[in-house]
Structures are given as structure tokens and as C-alpha cells.
Amino acid sequence: MRVLLVGFGAFGLWFARTLRETGHEVVAIERDGALVDRYAEWADRAIMGDATDPAVLTRAGAREVDAAVIGTSEALATTILTTVALRDLGVKAIYAKVRSENEARALEGLDITEAVFPEREAAFRLAHRIATSSVLQYTPIAPGYSVQEMAIPNDWVGKSILAIDPRTRLGVQVIAVRDALTGEFKLPPDPTALLKPSDSLVLAGGDETLADLAKG
């Protein structure tokens, strides 16, 4: 997969590093030459230029990318102009970093694929982890639903997933089991294996149900 990244700040750097480490190609455009020089190793190609300029986007190969991510923290007008330029060049999937609900609404008319709130999402996950100490990871997937990794509920220890039957009883799906002592990660889990106190579970389900489980 080839992705065009606009903006090589902190958000852009971590995005580029993660995408490349998973084997995908990143082409970055950044106005600040110092940032281009500093982080060029984390992109397959890094270009200094203004991404609102169609000529710069064309030079970066925007017509051939699978998706574009606008990760700048500049004015909303810059994001809008960049989005319009990308659309004109035929880029179908466009993700834009925004700082507020108002900015997200302003981009709705441009039919972007998704408005990304990195600060809000990070704060949301951290709040859930702090509020419930047994929750190790929290990822929202839809309003009222999430995927969570949590310590095993006390009354599940010594029982198998098959015997507990959380999918039928609670509407919760056990996606994976991780052993904290050995680091072993089983996806999908063995439904007949007995759960141990050192296990953590990756669960998908309703937030209220998962919150009740985390208390146990």
C-alpha cells in the first residue's frame, strides 16, 4: 500500500514510522526543510513543498497513492485546500487530522474518508484505562462498543471459554488470550483451555457489559 502523508510533525512522524514498519510505502510532503532532513529516513520519499499546490502533489505521485493522510496542525483553510487538490487529482481515500468538532463538520462537505482526532482518542483511551485499573487497552469500534484487553475476571479463572460461553450469556466475544508470564498470545484462543490467573483477555462487546466484567 502506498500512502501520501502531508505534514511531518509529531503525528506524521509516528504515522510514517508505524506504516513503514508494517511494510507499506510512505511518501511525505512537508513545508519545513529541517523536518524533511530530520525525518526523511522514515519515508520512502520525502519532499519539501506546499501540499495545497497541485504541482507539488503531482510531483509526489499523488495520482498513484492508495490513500492520503493530512497530518498538519496548520489552519483549517490549509487542510481544506489540500483536500480539494487531492480530490482533483483523483485520490479517493483522504484522512485529515482535526482539532475540533467544528473542523470535522467543515470537512464533511468535502466527503473526506475520516476526520481524525488524535488528542481526543488518546485521552479517551487513557481515561478508560485509569478509571478501570484492570483494563489494559481500550479501542472504541462503534458508539457504545469497544475492544478491550483486561485482566481475567476472578470467577473465570480455572474455567474454559467454552464452559463460560460469554458470547451467548453476555454478548461478548473473546478475540484472544495473552499469558502475562510467558508472553504467549493466542488468536483465536483455544476454547477448551482452562484460563489462568496470569491470562488477560481481548474482548469485544458493549461498553457497559465490559465495564461490569472489569470490576470482577
Image (cartoon, helix red, strand yellow):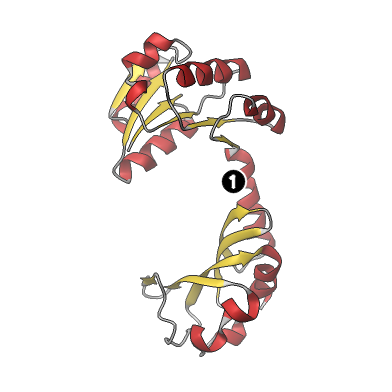
Task: Left or right? Give the position of 110 relative to 53.
Answer: right
Q: Is residue 56 above or below residue 5?
A: above
Residue 132 in view (yes/no): yes
Residue named by callout 1: 122
The residue carrying pointer 1 sits among few (fewer than 14), some (14 to 19) or many (20 or more) residues within 10 Å by Cα, namely few
User: To which quarter of the image does residue 102 belong?
Assistant: top right
Q: Is residue 143 above or below residue 171?
A: above
Q: Is residue 116 above or below residue 166?
A: above
User: To which quarter of the image does residue 187 belong?
Assistant: bottom left
SS for tag 1? helix
Position of residue 49 measured from the top left corner of the image (x, y, whole percent): 40, 12
Disc 1 residue type?
Answer: Ala
Q: Is residue 70 above or below residue 82?
A: below
Residue 35 in view (yes/no): no
Label total for image: 1
User: To which quarter of the image does residue 216 belong?
Assistant: bottom right
Position of residue 129 measured from the top left corner of the image (x, y, whole percent): 62, 59
Position of residue 72 measured from the top left corner of the image (x, y, whole percent): 52, 24
